[in-house]
Image (cartoon, helix red, strand yellow):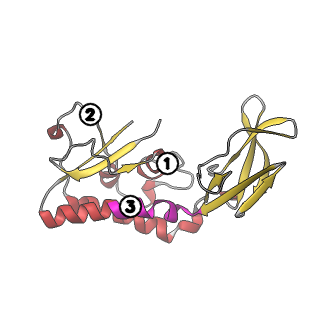
Amino acid sequence: MGVTLHLGFDDSVASDTKHCGKSFMSEIISPSYPDYFNLDDFLTPEEQLLLYPDYNQYDDKVDKYRHIDPLTLKDVFKKVYDYLQKYQNNFPLTHLISENDKNYSSSSDRFNYKGHECYIDGFHHDYNHRHELCLTYWQNGWKPLEWIKASNKVIVGDKTYYVQTKNKFEQYKDILQELIDICEEGIKANRRLIWVFSN
């Protein structure tokens, strides 16, 4: 199940979605991988609380959420943006995979290879293998079988895959810039914002 994020004026409807994405929530908003992206490195505890959105249950009224000063929130988003840009080479890469060079995702469909049920994982988060794809197989749990050098086109057995590689800054800069722009709108309009998520 994905995560939906919304940033808007304090009287806006929270279901008016602005951003979607489980990976943005799990890697940037509440990092699940603090071994490579730790908010403590550049945000105060107060800024981290501000970065984390309120939970939207859809039936809640807007007045139940925090009404946030857009200038303060913009500063937090800008710190995240700048940190990702400055340290982009310190994080794992993201490899998007496609069988038809059109529909890209974080992993391939499952297939048989060398007698194993396998899939290719492009979101493995292993910095030591940041330029590689993880060929993962099932043996009492999913485990790495091989590491494959990421390139625009990868052949595994009789399968051909197309790969698009991005660093963490490239992956998230557009979302962060949109959030910063919404904060700018709030500043110009002298309006507070609500910042919520739902799943």
Give the vertical position of 82 relative to 48 (above or below): below
Q: Main secondary structure of the magenta part?
A: helix
Which residue does the image show at 27% across and 58% down from the upper left? Answer: 73
Q: Residue furthest bottom?
A: 86
Occupied quadrant, residue 15:
top left
Residue at disc 3, secondary structure = helix
Q: State the image coordinates of residue 40 (x, y, percent, origin top left).
A: 43, 55
How crowded pointer 3 is (Cα within 10 Å; few <14, some 14-19, many 20+) is rated as: many
Give the vertical position of 121 relative to 170 (above or below): above
Q: Which residue in the structure is indicated by mark 1? A: 23
Q: Earlier in the sequence, mark 1 or mark 2?
A: 1
Give the residues drawn in magenta, as a range: 166-178
Q: Which residue in the structure is indicated by mark 3? A: 176
Residue at disc 1, secondary structure = helix
Give the vertical position of 170 relative to 135 (above or below): below
Q: Which residue in the structure is indicated by mark 2? A: 58
In-image side of 87 versus 187 (left or right): right
